[in-house]
Image (cartoon, rainbow, N blue to C red):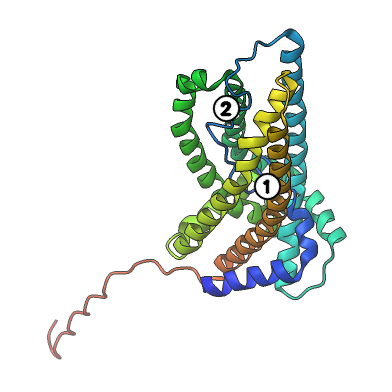
Amino acid sequence: MNPGAIWSQAWRLARQHSWLWLPGLFLAGLGSGNVDLTLPGTLNAVGDRTLVYSVPDVMGIVFLSGVLAVGGVALWVAGAVARGALIVAVDRLADDQPIDLATALAAGVAHFGRLFLIGLPVAIPALLLTFVAYTGALASLSGPVAMASNLVLTVLLPVCGLLVITSLALTLVQHFADRAAVLEDLGPLAAIRTGWSELVTHARQLRGTIAGWAALTVLVRLLLVLPTTGLMLPVLFSMVAGGGLAMPGLLLLAVAVFLTVILVLLLAVVNVFMSALWTLVYRACRAAPPQAPATHPEEPAPPEPAEGQA
């Protein structure tokens, strides 16, 4: 296994086949093969004021949260299809076999059920991180004094770190399980067992790849979460709760939206690259000869008895 050659081939496939970026756009939700991040603290959207919520304000916040939740679920479903489509596409392109977007998406739909089930455990820390994001955004509507004294935000910081580490570990196993399910036509449990076995067997060879993947994934996701969770979400909650939006806030929101669009496009390319990387890694792991079990040095054979001896 040559990690450098695998990284180079993955980047070449992601760069040359730009139609793969379309399914890559949907790999941003829960259990989508990415690490979900959030921020324990967000922009103070109301300045020195403390908002008093009326019943319509609370209903507006609940409605906005529901809309965002429904959008997240839709993205989750689309992400499972996109995962299967990218795995099949890269597997065929690596063998120089022709494939188009429609064929790849059809394969993603065919493998949707098992990939969706494999992604369920990965979605648990992502759901908790989403709750943390909403908590931080709502706390930003309480004014700076209350935010400074809010012990909840202090507790959320280590919780976020623990959830991100958990998400990283589960996502790594998911990468191998997804490919076992798609490339070897295994059910969810069998795919998880096979993927885990391959990961453990080749963990020493994949240390550099895992470290590079983790660093790149966290960096890109953190860049995306800064304008979304840190800026857009608290401003939207403030508007729904009747806090209004002054011109500086409106300009800040416009900049955040622009940055989010650019970063989502960047994330799509990174998603395709990472999907191609793990598909090629899995193929290399399966093609590698099995490791011979450790053997003890052979003991010298006892000398043959001399002629005429019993």
Sooner in the amino-acid sequence: mark 1 or mark 2: 2
Label 1 and label 2: CA atoms lie apart by 39 Å
Q: Which residue is under mark 1?
A: 187
Residue 209 drawn above or below residue 263: below
Q: Secondary structure at mark 1?
A: loop
> What kind of residue is marked 2?
Gly
Query: Which residue corresponds to the image point at 55% horizontal and 36% vertical from the top-left?
Result: 39
Side of 298 where 278 appears, left or right: right
Residue 288 appears anywhere in the view: yes
Query: Which residue corresponds to the image point at 80% horizontal and 63% vertical from the top-left?
Result: 19
Residue 182 drawn above or below residue 117: below
Residue 185 appears anywhere in the view: no
Q: Quadrant of residue 97?
A: bottom right
Q: Which residue is under mark 2?
A: 136
> What kind of residue is marked 1?
Gly
Q: Residue 242: x, y in percent? A: 73, 18
Residue 15 drawn above or below residue 308: above
Q: Residue 68: x, y in percent? A: 74, 31
